[in-house]
Amino acid sequence: MHTSPITQPHFLANNLALDLINSAFGTGDEYHDCLTDDASVIAWLKAAKQLPENFTDAPTGLIQDALALRQAMVQTIEAVRSGKEYNPERINQILDSGRPVRMLEWNSQQAGFSVVECRRDNSCASLLEPVAMAFAALVSGPEVKYIRQCEAHDCTLFFLDTTKSHRRRWCSMALCGNRMKVAAFRSRKQEAD
């Protein structure tokens, strides 16, 4: 996909759930999956600012749940695009089992009470629930029509097009946009010669 191999996760989708989908990217020999074991999922969640840096309690089976969630989200996007019915059972299981706990706490800065949302526990579902919730909000809301896949022929990344005109074509100008523009320019120049 790129001239130098990139192995770190991309966080350029403008949506947490799409960023998880993008944790697997590239094609052919340049395919890379950032999620390889429970620890790599924890590392991704930390990089996505969903866990504190000092978090170390990775539940067993987190990788299987993360990969299943990622696949279910891709299938849901495909269903949305095709207009075909799809049962997002895996996403709903995570939303149900991982739902956060809400508590009433005293807020000394406001000198009053506020409702605080906290992770229920350190189970797989609780750790992945913010991603599933971001996805549920995206595909059930008006922004669903702005989910795009990069137009570069060798890029698999998704993004949420938040530009004013909603005409964004590439995952990012740095990764694919400039490269595709140069290729198009060279092609036009060759045809003119």
Image (tube, helix red, strand yellow):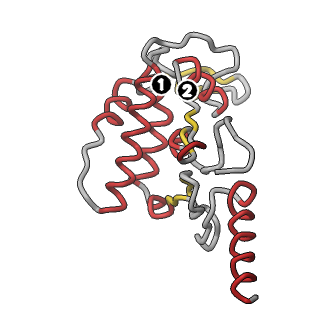
Q: Quadrant of residue 47?
A: top right
**Mark 2: few, some, or many residues within 10 Å (few <14, many ≥20)?**
few
The answer to whether residue 104 is left or right of residue 185 is left
Q: Which residue is mark 1?
A: 102
Q: What is the residue that sits farthest to the front in this orientation?
A: 193
Relative to 157, residue 90 above or below:
above
| Image quarter in which the C terminus is found | bottom right
Which residue lies at the image location 36% right of the left edge and 54% below the top edge? 78
Q: Which residue is mark 2?
A: 116
**Mark 1: few, some, or many residues within 10 Å (few <14, many ≥20)?**
few
Q: Quadrant of residue 111?
A: top right
Closer to the chain start, of discs 1 and 2, is 1
Work out how far the residue at label 1 is from the one at label 2, CA to CA, in angstroms: 6 Å
* Secondary structure beneath label 2: strand
Relative to 157, residue 6 above or below:
above
The answer to whether residue 24 is left or right of residue 144 is right
Relative to 17, residue 179 above or below:
below
Which residue lies at the image location 47% right of the left edge and 28% below the top edge? 128
From the viewer's side, name the closer residue of 69 and 108: 69
* Secondary structure beneath label 1: strand
Instruction: Please provide percent x and percent y for residue 79.
Output: 32, 55
Which amino acid lies under the numbered mark 2 shown in the image of this protein? Answer: Val
Instruction: Please provide percent x and percent y for residue 121.
Output: 47, 15
Which residue lies at the image location 62% right of the left edge and 67% below the top edge? 168
Q: What is the residue that sits farthest to the bottom in this orientation?
A: 192
Residues tagged 1 and 2 counted as in contact (Cβ below 8 A): yes
Which amino acid lies under the numbered mark 1 shown in the image of this protein? Answer: Arg
Instruction: Please provide percent x and percent y for residue 32.
Output: 58, 37
Q: Quadrant of residue 16?
A: top right
Instruction: Please provide percent x and percent y for residue 133.
Output: 45, 39
From the viewer's side, name the closer residue of 183 and 12: 183
Which residue lies at the image location 25% right of the left edge and 58% below the top edge? 84
